[in-house]
Image: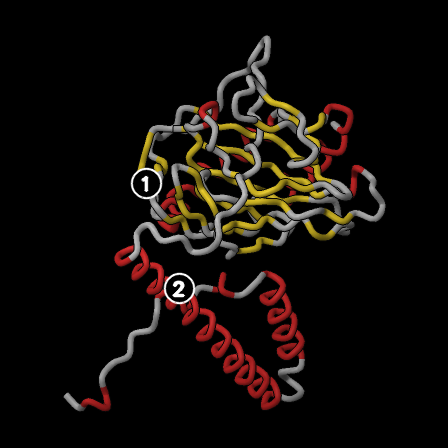
Amino acid sequence: MDPHKVPVSFPENLTNHNLLSPRERELLASILRHARQRADESPEMTRNVEEMLARAVGEVLLERSAEMAGRDVLEQIRQQSFPTISAGPPSPSPAPGPHPPAPSPAPGPRRSFQTSAVAVQERLELLRAECVLLDEFLAPQELQELTRFALEQENAFHISEVISPGVEGGIVDPENRRSRVLMDLGKHGDVVVGRIQSALPRVLEKLGMKTFSVSRVETQITASNHGDFFRHHSDNREEEVASRQLTFVYFFHREPKAFHGGELRLHNSQLENGAWTHPGDYRAVVPEQNQIVFFRSELLHEITPVVCPSQAFADSRFTVNGWLHR
């Protein structure tokens, strides 16, 4: 075989459109629409625009794909050669995790999956800030009804609590978490869980998690307004919630969007002396309408402060967040 004609294999993630942010994809789609609207007038210009975009996007994808591949190789080398090395200075103890719903005097039917096959995470020394993002998660009508429901239930939201070591039940801890939560989603909880069940096979495959039997699914709506946040924490650190395996966060808000901030930051995490710490590297997920993110419940994560100038409840950053238990 001619050595100059050896086939080249590209990384599988090179054509993954998730290497581009939703805003970048939206901008590219807008440029293409405008170019094609003028295709009849100037087909040559349309071809030139598309060729230019193709080259630019290709360069960006190559750069980002190469960086991801480089991180993978470095992490594999680090795990093989230095399994206990710290990637940075010791981090402060994570904040307590979110408190699960308190038992109801008359609980409704438990939500469960038709199949028992979902993911189980291995006990790893290192956890990368990996997640799965799905756009347009709910149908437009379902999104509208969920938004209307959340706004109508304003008076039913209460101050968020956290689980603290050595303390039975949840406590209000404004130094670590500020937001309001609604535990009862009504019919909307079944809708969200149903969508999760449909999406789960590809989510598990992308996260590389083993199967386990789901014992229960927690869901809640969180409203975060001006100044609200949640310091970095793990969702299954305490014994009370140790069975949480997979965390999900679904973003929604009233249009037009009246807040900014409130990023979900997923930290590369390292197990040291039985506790998860983070060396400082993280992946930021900016809240986007009708988008859901999945990640391992052990992974350290945080919510950055929300900026909502109106401070009106209806303008809050809303999420349906929850956990799949083993």
- Secondary structure under tag 1 reads loop
Could you tell me which residue is drawn at 47 percent across and 77 percent down?
58
- Left or right, 38 with respect to 244, comes to right
Q: Tag 1: Cα neighbours inside 10 Å, few (<14), some, or many (≥20)?
A: few
Q: Earlier in the sequence, mark 2 or mark 1?
A: 2
Q: Which residue is disc 1 drawn over?
A: 122
Could you tell me which residue is drawn at 70 percent across and 33 percent down?
174
Q: Can you tell which mark lies on residue 228?
A: none
Q: Position of residue 305 (x, y in %)?
A: 70, 47
- Secondary structure under tag 2 reads helix
Which residue is situated farthest in the top direction here?
105
Quarter the C terminus occupies: top left
Could you tell me which residue is drawn at 40 percent across and 64 percent down?
71
Which residue is situated farthest in the front direction here?
89
User: Distance of mark 2 from mark 1, alpha carbons?
Assistant: 20 Å
Could you tell me which residue is drawn at 60 percent across and 26 percent down?
187
